[in-house]
Image (cartoon, grey):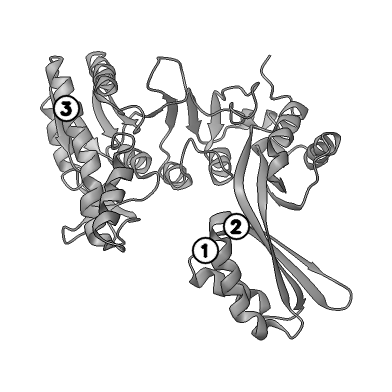
């Protein structure tokens, strides 16, 4: 008998009909001879509606109470899913994150999992139950309800799979798996059968929306192999696991795009110790996440520093930089630009193949796409381009690396 953890997202349980469909799938998995833990999200739209309710009664809802409110979304779904399974003749029980022994730190609305003691989960499984577990939530050591932030249900599934030493973890969503690029952008994108943790991490951090990066990080840390697949059909998905030597034969595994980016450039920065710390310290204190950083030192000792960030954070970031301009240097100025997108190619085969960046740049040149900034890592090369050119750029690079489906 195998122990399987399955996760179903908000779209998969978006209405009663879909909940019943998920219930049938879960029950069939148990009837095939497996023990099943099913992690479910709130029904699509429920969390947003709860946030609207909170904002209707308070302009700044306290985060402690916000967690209490938001956690009810998943509690609705676990109860309904368990009811549906029981109505089909199965035996299911629902558990909240706290009941399942998921302990977190005390940071409300974006808590981190500190420990899992799945005693109740094992007892319920041993009694022949299917365990329906609320994703996205846990409790502190003193019993306060917390939520895990974006991608919290994926993280719940991966973490629980590690805690119970599951034989398999399946992440069910509304797509058939991980694709070489967003199929809505590149029509010839194809599903990837197997991808390494590191490649999945790079794609997630570069704009791929299939998985949140911290869930993949957790899976890599604890060696949890997981499969991303569609809850609406029985097609095989994409297996995410530790890399193997054969994986390096594929130079580029996939392409990610990220829209709604912006750039800040600080001109005439003195080339001296402590300046970068001053700039990025101010950004960090404002809790703004930055991405690509480029520094260019001229012969006269002056430096231009550019960095990218989410366009939504641009006004705050620019304001923070302007506060420290006088401390940076007498001639220092700041410029900003929005309407930028990022294109990234990812593949562990890039470590052992030369000319990868050159091929990417040649494809963009042929498509008449201008490159603004370049960033590289061992298995990724990323560029920023005008957002108006991002789809044309993705299609050109996808074809250049032979990723188009036949």
Residue 46, image x, y percentages? 29, 39
Label 3 and label 1: CA atoms lie apart by 40 Å
User: Which x, y percent locates residue 231?
Assistant: 37, 22
User: Considering only vertical position in the picture, is 54 above or below 231?
Assistant: below
- The quarter of the picture where the N terminus appears is top left
Whether tag 3 and tag 2 are in contact, CB under 8 A, the answer is: no
Q: Could you tell me if residue 6 is visible in this image?
A: yes
> Where residue 121 appears, x then y in whole percent?
18, 37
Count neighbours of disc 3 (C-alpha within 10 A) and say few if under 14, some if 14 to 19, many if 20 or more: many
Residue under label 2: 309
Q: In 3D space, how far apart are the residues under numbered discs 2 and 1 (Cα atoms)?
A: 8 Å
Q: Is tag 3's residue or tag 2's residue first in the polypeptide sequence?
A: 3
Q: Residue at x 59, y 79 (%)?
A: 323
Q: Is residue 70 left or right of residue 368?
A: left
Whether residue 45 sits left or right of residue 322 in the image: it is: left
* Tag 2 and tag 1, C-beta contact below 8 Å: yes
Residue in view at x 33 percent, y 30 percent: 8
Q: Please state if 262 lies on the left or on the right of 169 as rendered.
A: right
Residue 227 vs 264, above or below: the answer is: above
For the residues carrying marks 3 and 1, which lies nearer the camera in this image? Answer: 1
Most distant residue in the right direction: 299
As rendered, which of 222 and 332 lies closer to the eye?
332
Callout 1 secondary element: loop
* Circle on res. 145: none
- Residue 288: give its label: 1
Q: Nearer the viewer, mark 3 or mark 2?
A: 2
- Dot 2 falls on a residue whose secondary structure is strand
Earlier sequence position, callout 3 versus callout 1: 3
Q: Which residue is mark 3?
A: 82
In the rendered image, is residue 129 in sight?
A: no
Pick whichever, 361 or 123, lies toward us.
361
């Amino acid at each position: 008998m195998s122990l399987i953890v399955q996760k179903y997202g908000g779209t998969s349980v978006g209405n009663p009909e879909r909940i019943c469909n998920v219930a049938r799938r879960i029950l069939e998995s148990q009837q095939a001879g497996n023990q099943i833990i099913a992690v479910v999200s709130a029904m699509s739209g429920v969390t947003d509606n709860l946030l609207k309710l909170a904002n209707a009664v308070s302009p700044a809802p306290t985060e402690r109470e916000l967690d209490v409110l938001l956690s009810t979304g998943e509690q609705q779904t676990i109860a309904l899913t368990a009811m549906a399974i029981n109505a089909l003749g199965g035996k299911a029980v629902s558990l909240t994150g706290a009941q399942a022994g998921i302990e977190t730190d005390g940071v409300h609305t974006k808590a981190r999992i500190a420990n899992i003691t799945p005693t109740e989960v094992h007892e319920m499984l041993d009694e022949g139950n299917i365990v329906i577990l609320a994703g996205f939530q846990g409790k502190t050591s003193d019993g306060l309800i917390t939520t895990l932030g974006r991608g919290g249900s994926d993280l719940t599934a991966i973490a629980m799979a590690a805690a119970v030493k599951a034989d398999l973890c399946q992440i069910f969503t509304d797509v058939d798996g991980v694709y070489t690029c967003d199929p809505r952008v590149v029509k010839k994108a194809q599903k990837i059968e197997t991808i390494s943790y590191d490649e999945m991490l790079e794609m997630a951090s570069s704009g791929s929306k299939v998985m949140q990066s911290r869930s993949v990080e957790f899976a890599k840390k604890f060696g949890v192999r997981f499969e991303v697949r569609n809850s609406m059909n029985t097609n095989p998905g994409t297996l995410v696991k530790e890399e193997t030597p054969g994986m390096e034969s594929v130079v580029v595994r996939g392409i990610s795009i990220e829209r709604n980016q912006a750039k800040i450039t600080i001109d005439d920065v003195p080339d001296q110790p402590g300046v970068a710390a001053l700039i990025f310290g101010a950004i960090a204190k404002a809790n703004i996440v930055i991405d690509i950083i480029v520094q260019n030192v001229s012969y006269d000792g002056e430096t231009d520093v550019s960095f990218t960030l989410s366009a939504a954070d641009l006004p705050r970031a620019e304001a923070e930089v302007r506060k420290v301009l006088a401390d940076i240097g007498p001639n220092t100025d700041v410029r900003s630009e929005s309407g930028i997108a990022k294109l990234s190619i990812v593949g562990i085969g890039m470590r052992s193949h030369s000319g990868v960046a050159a091929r990417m740049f040649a494809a963009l040149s042929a498509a008449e796409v201008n490159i603004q900034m370049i960033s590289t890592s061992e298995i990724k090369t990323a560029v920023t381009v005008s957002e108006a050119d991002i789809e044309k750029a993705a299609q050109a690079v996808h074809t250049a690396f032979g990723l188009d489906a036949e």
